[in-house]
Image (cartoon, grey):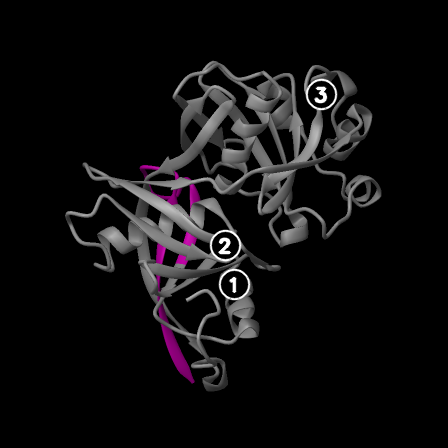
């Protein structure tokens, strides 16, 4: 049996046992099937396998949920960036920025060093798909039609990973939502989306939850890959103040409160760049035993 070491972080939080847990496996190459089995064994929202990058990238990441590989994800990107800076020593102390290579492409990372390191990712280009009827969105979330805002569309969108965005009228509606799997299958392609992201706007930003059973995640405590596109969606709909800073809360209803910070650079047409950032807490490390045939299966295709 071979062994692989991993680091465990809580991401988008400044305290342990909050935020979104993340396992980071550094410098080990496994087969695709083995990485998926490890992610299923860890049973976290995402597990990351990271190797040193080349061609200008500090690191190359493979990101797996318990159910599938994803090409872009926020809390694994932010958490792994902080791991590279604070724990693995892959980033020089004088570096304020670097690039990480994901399946979707190269993601710029900015670092703010302080009492806790904050990592900021730049959201990849956002695209939008079809809209869903208000009544169908309500049935998917088990809420009343009046709980779904009528002035904003329930719409598919994302940065590589498509989500259904559903605007709700209040935090209370967000908290009482319950996913109706049969309604999802009826109204949406089960394998065409990564999750259902629903939110209520607040004075500072948004209060959100995200269900993703199609990715092997019943509920995600923090979804950075959905947060950046959320603000692109709100700007597209004319529902976002032209401020430079916002805050999204997520995970509160499931007892894993997370805080995702958003920075927006605007131009005349709208957001020019959307960054999502946060801190992470190192909570432990361990070693996982696995069959020898899983190890050294060839180079990562993202490296």
Q: Looking at the image, is 123 positioned above or below residue 236? A: below
Q: Earlier in the sequence, mark 2 or mark 3?
A: 2
Secondary structure of residue under mark 1: helix
Real-space CA distance between mark 2 and mark 1, rounded to the nearest whole angstrom:
7 Å
Q: Looking at the image, is 185 positioned above or below residue 49? A: above
Question: Which residue does the image show at 44% across and 22% down from the upper left?
Answer: 267
Question: Which residue does the image show at 49% across and 34% down from the upper left?
Answer: 228
Q: What is the magenta range?
A: 1-23
Q: Is residue 146 left or right of residue 30?
A: right
Q: Quadrant of residue 130?
A: top right
Q: Which mark is residue 39?
A: 1
Question: Which residue does the image show at 39% across and 42% down from the upper left?
Answer: 121
Real-space CA distance between mark 1 and mark 3, rounded to the nearest whole angstrom:
34 Å
User: Residue 181's x, y, as percent?
Assistant: 76, 44
Judged by its main secondary structure, the magenta piece is: strand
Q: Is residue 46 left or right of residue 91?
A: right
In this view of the protein, which residue sits in the foreground, 170 or 160? 160
Q: Which mark is residue 148?
A: 3
Secondary structure of residue under mark 3: loop
Q: Looking at the image, is 195 positioned above or below residue 257? A: below
Whether pointer 2 and pointer 1 mark residues with C-beta atoms closer than 8 Å, the reply is: yes
Question: Which residue does the image show at 61% across and 20% down from the upper left?
Answer: 172
Residue tagged by mark 2?
A: 46
Real-space CA distance between mark 2 and mark 3, rounded to the nearest whole angstrom:
29 Å
Q: Earlier in the sequence, mark 1 or mark 3?
A: 1
Q: Residues within 10 Å of mark 1 (few under 14, many from 20)?
A: many
Secondary structure of residue under mark 2: strand
């Amino acid at each position: 049996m071979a062994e692989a070491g991993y680091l465990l972080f809580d991401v988008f939080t400044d305290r342990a046992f909050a935020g979104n847990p993340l396992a980071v496996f550094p410098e080990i190459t496994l087969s695709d099937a083995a990485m998926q089995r490890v992610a299923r064994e860890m049973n976290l929202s995402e597990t990351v396998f990271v190797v040193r990058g080349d061609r200008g990238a500090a690191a190359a990441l493979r990101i797996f949920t318990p159910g599938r590989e994803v090409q872009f994800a926020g809390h694994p990107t932010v958490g792994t960036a902080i791991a590279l800076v604070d724990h693995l020593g892959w980033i020089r102390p004088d570096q304020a920025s670097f690039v990480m290579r994901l399946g979707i492409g190269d993601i710029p990372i900015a670092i703010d060093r302080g009492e806790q390191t904050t990592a900021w990712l730049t959201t990849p280009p956002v695209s939008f798909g079809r809209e869903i009827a208000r009544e169908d969105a309500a049935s998917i979330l088990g809420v009343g039609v009046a709980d779904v805002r009528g002035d904003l569309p329930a719409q598919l969108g994302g940065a590589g990973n498509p989500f259904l965005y559903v605007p709700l009228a209040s935090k209370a509606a967000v908290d009482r939502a319950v996913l109706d799997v049969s309604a999802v299958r009826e109204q949406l392609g089960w394998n065409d989306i990564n999750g259902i992201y629903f939110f209520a706007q607040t004075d500072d930003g948004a209060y959100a939850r995200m269900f993703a059973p199609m990715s092997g995640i019943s509920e995600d405590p923090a979804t950075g890959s959905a947060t950046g596109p959320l603000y692109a969606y709100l700007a597209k709909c004319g529902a976002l103040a032209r401020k430079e800073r916002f805050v999204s809360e997520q995970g509160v209803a499931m007892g894993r409160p997370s805080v995702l910070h958003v920075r927006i650079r605007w131009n005349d047409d709208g957001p020019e760049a959307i960054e999502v950032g946060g801190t992470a807490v190192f909570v432990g490390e361990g070693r996982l035993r696995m069959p020898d045939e899983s190890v050294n299966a060839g180079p990562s295709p993202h490296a």
